[in-house]
Image (cartoon, rainbow, N blue to C red):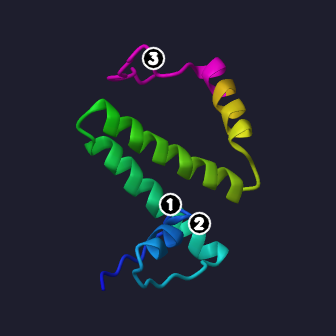
């Protein structure tokens, strides 16, 4: 039996069950959960970076966004609050649309 030892989406056990396969899960403590969310975030971001086409890229970005939703909820927030913070930072410092790459800044 393959061993996965990773955080999975909530409906994965139900999907596995429908195949008739046996599986084992556990419910994580808050400490374990945040650690696994961090790991899953890196995993999903890596999959995005390695995506070869638009469709795969968008699928992986959706997974990254799902992790962001879960992280916001874990911290007692919401995606709306995160979006407000993002907008405020964009208003104050800009976004990344202009593709500006800072090479150096003169020392005093």
The single residue placed furthest to the right in the displayed view is: 76
Name the residue rendered at 40%, 41% in the picture.
59
Which numbered tag is attached to residue 81? Answer: none
Where is the C terminus found, in terms of image quarters?
A: top left
Q: Report whether 52 appears left or right of 57.
A: left
Residue 10, quarter of the rendered image: bottom right
Classified by dominant secondary structure, the portion drawn in magenta counts as: loop
Question: Please, what secondary structure does the residue beneath circle 3 have?
Answer: loop
Q: Report whether 71 appears left or right of 77.
A: left
Magenta stretch contains residue 42 = no
Where is residue 70? Give x, y as percent.
62, 55
- Please determine whether, in this image, residue 106 is positioned above or below residue 72: above
Which numbered tag is attached to residue 34? Answer: 2
Residue at mark 1: 38
- How far apart are the alpha carbons under marks 2 and 1? 6 Å
- Please determine whether, in this image, residue 102 is positioned above or below residue 83: above
- Part of the protein shown in magenta: 89-108
Asked if marks 2 and 1 touch (Cβ < 8 Å), the reply is: yes
Residue 56, quarter of the rendered image: top left
Residue at mark 3: 97
């Amino acid at each position: 039996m393959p061993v996965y030892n990773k955080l999975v989406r909530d409906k994965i056990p139900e999907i596995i069950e429908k195949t008739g396969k046996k599986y084992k899960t556990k419910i994580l403590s808050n400490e374990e959960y945040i650690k696994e969310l961090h790991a899953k975030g890196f995993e999903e971001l890596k999959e995005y970076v390695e995506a070869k086409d638009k469709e795969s890229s968008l699928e992986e970005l959706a997974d990254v966004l799902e992790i962001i939703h879960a992280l916001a909820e874990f911290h007692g927030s919401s995606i709306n609050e995160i979006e407000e913070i993002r907008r405020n930072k964009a208003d104050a410092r800009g976004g990344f649309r202009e593709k500006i790459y800072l090479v150096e800044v003169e020392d005093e």
